[in-house]
Image (cartoon, helix red, strand yellow):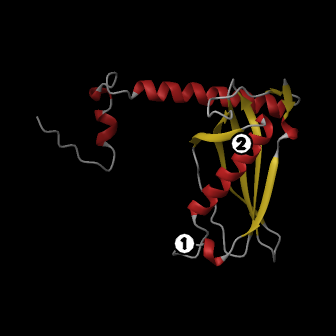
Amino acid sequence: MHKHTKESQVAITQLMLPSHSNFSGKIHGGHILNLMDQIAFACASKHSNHYCVTASVNRVDFLNPIEVGELVTLKASVNYTGRTSMVIGLRVESENIQTGKVKHCNSSYFTMVAKDENGRNAPVPGLILDSEQSIRRFARSIARQDQAKKRSTKFKSSEFKIEEHMEILKKQNAKIELTK
């Protein structure tokens, strides 16, 4: 079975309150991450018709601060489907209610895994790729997975070669004091 992306897209909008702010008066990043996890869960569960868990989060960059009193909209859609996992693409925007100005605050990718009633991984419907954008997003997810595999192998302790990294480290804000 396969589904169109639009069948499981989810969006929520929420007013940011003072209780959501950090010590500098901006909306706390942890609050936004919590909302992102909720909407990724909703999107993945809607696509798979199963309870889903977060397996990983690929890069969260906070691009613009969110102010108290702004409306925050989170949008989620399935970008990739594996056998039991899905990559959910998320976009976070804030809107100043008085001016109508919209800011892109964050984009991220959550890998979600579908679970059956016994807690075992459950197969998920595939995606129907019906636009150039959906093909680009699916292909991009595959490329991200390949990059992650290469990263984890290159820095595995049994594979790591310290001499390959010494010149780079000398240019960083670090002091090397190896003990024998």
Sort mark 2 into few (<14), some (14-19) or many (20+) by Cα contacts within 10 Å: many
The residue carrying mark 2 is 89
Residue 21 placed where, x, y %? 59, 73
Q: Quadrant of residue 112?
A: top right
The N terminus sits in image quarter = top right
Q: Secondary structure at mark 2?
A: strand
The residue carrying mark 1 is 22
Q: Which mark is residue 114?
A: none
Q: Secondary structure at mark 1?
A: loop
Residue pictured at 28% horizontal, 29% vertical: 162
Could you tell which of marks 2 and 1 lies nearer the N-terminus? 1
The reply to whether the C-beta atoms of the residues labelled 2 and 1 are less than 8 Å apart is no
Which residue type carries mark 1?
Asn
Sort mark 1 into few (<14), some (14-19) or many (20+) by Cα contacts within 10 Å: few
Residue pictured at 53% horizontal, 30% vertical: 148
Which residue type carries mark 2?
Gly
- Viewer-proximal residue among 81 and 65: 81
Residue pictured at 63% horizontal, 41% vertical: 53
Disc 2/disc 1 C-alpha distance (Å): 26 Å
